[in-house]
């Protein structure tokens, strides 16, 4: 109980629901039941330490933009931004939204690892973000997603990383 006092009270009360209900930028999420449920379930999947990391100093903010899939923005003082694109939102509304969840958890991975202030290569950051999604068991969805992409060097390396993880799983059995 003591550490409660050290925390910023308003931050410690952040929940998946308050993120979606209280942020004026989230009107586009609130106006569609399926989209709302998707983000609520995604936020509820986060284990507490990851949820707190994403929402303690700053708060998660989902913005909608024309473009492709999803990305993060250099963060502001107030928010950790994730940009969602029409393709991704179409997946959110589809019967199986697990690919959209995988995409979102990859983006969470960039934020959790502070990749905006990270000078390492884009490939290393992509793989770290994939590994965060893998931690939440989205390896099949990520593989499916990347198999639909052009075989760039980055895509090939990310698929290799996923493949070696999947192989390590089958060795465990
Ligand atoms: Zn990425």
Image (spheres, rainbow, N blue to C red):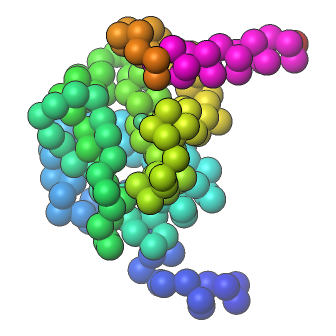
Q: Quadrant of ligand 1?
A: top left
Q: Is residue 166 above or below residue 78?
A: above
Residue at 17 percent across and 63 percent down: it is 24
- From where the camera sits, is residue 36 visible? no
Assign the magenta stretch its main secondary structure. helix
Q: Quadrant of the N terminus?
A: bottom right
Query: 65 or 114: nearer the eye?
Result: 114
Vertical order, 162 against 104 (above or below): above
Q: Picture coordinates of residue 33 (x, y %)?
A: 24, 37
Q: Tell me the residue at 44%/59% (across/down).
A: 117
Magenta segment: 155-172
Q: Quadrant of residue 145?
A: top left
Give the residue displayed 41% in from the left and 55% down from the top. 116
Q: How many marks?
A: 0
Taking the magenta stretch, the answer to whether it contains residue 32 is: no
Estimate the x, y position of residue 63 in percent, counting from the top left. Answer: 22, 48
Residues 12 and 129: in front is 129
Q: From where the camera sits, is residue 163 visible?
A: yes
- Furthest-left residue in view? 66
Query: In this rendering, is residue 142 above or below 170?
Result: below
Left or right of 67 on screen, residue 99: right
Who is closer to the viewer here, 89 or 114? 114
* Residue 2 shown left or right of residue 113 in the figure: right
Q: Is residue 17 left or right of residue 108?
A: left
Name the residue at 18% across, 58% down. 25
Figure quadrant of the C terminus = top right
Q: Residue 125, image x and y in percent?
A: 51, 40
């Amino acid at each position: 109980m003591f550490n409660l006092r050290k925390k910023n009270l308003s931050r410690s009360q952040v929940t998946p629901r308050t993120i979606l209900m209280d942020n004026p930028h989230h009107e586009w999420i609130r106006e569609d039941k399926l989209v709302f449920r998707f983000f609520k379930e995604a936020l509820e999947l986060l284990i507490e330490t990851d949820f707190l990391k994403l929402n303690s100093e700053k708060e998660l903010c989902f913005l909608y933009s024309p473009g492709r899939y999803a990305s993060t923005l250099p963060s502001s003082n107030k928010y950790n931004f994730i940009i969602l694109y029409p393709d991704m939102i179409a997946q959110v509304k589809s019967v199986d939204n697990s690919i959209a969840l995988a995409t979102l958890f990859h983006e969470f991975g960039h934020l959790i690892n502070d990749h905006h202030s990270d000078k390492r290569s884009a490939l290393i950051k992509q793989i770290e973000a994939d590994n965060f999604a893998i931690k939440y068991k989205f390896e099949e969805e990520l593989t499916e997603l990347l198999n639909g992409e052009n075989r760039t060097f980055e895509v090939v390396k990310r698929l290799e990383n996923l493949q070696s993880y999947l192989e390590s799983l089958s060795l465990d059995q």
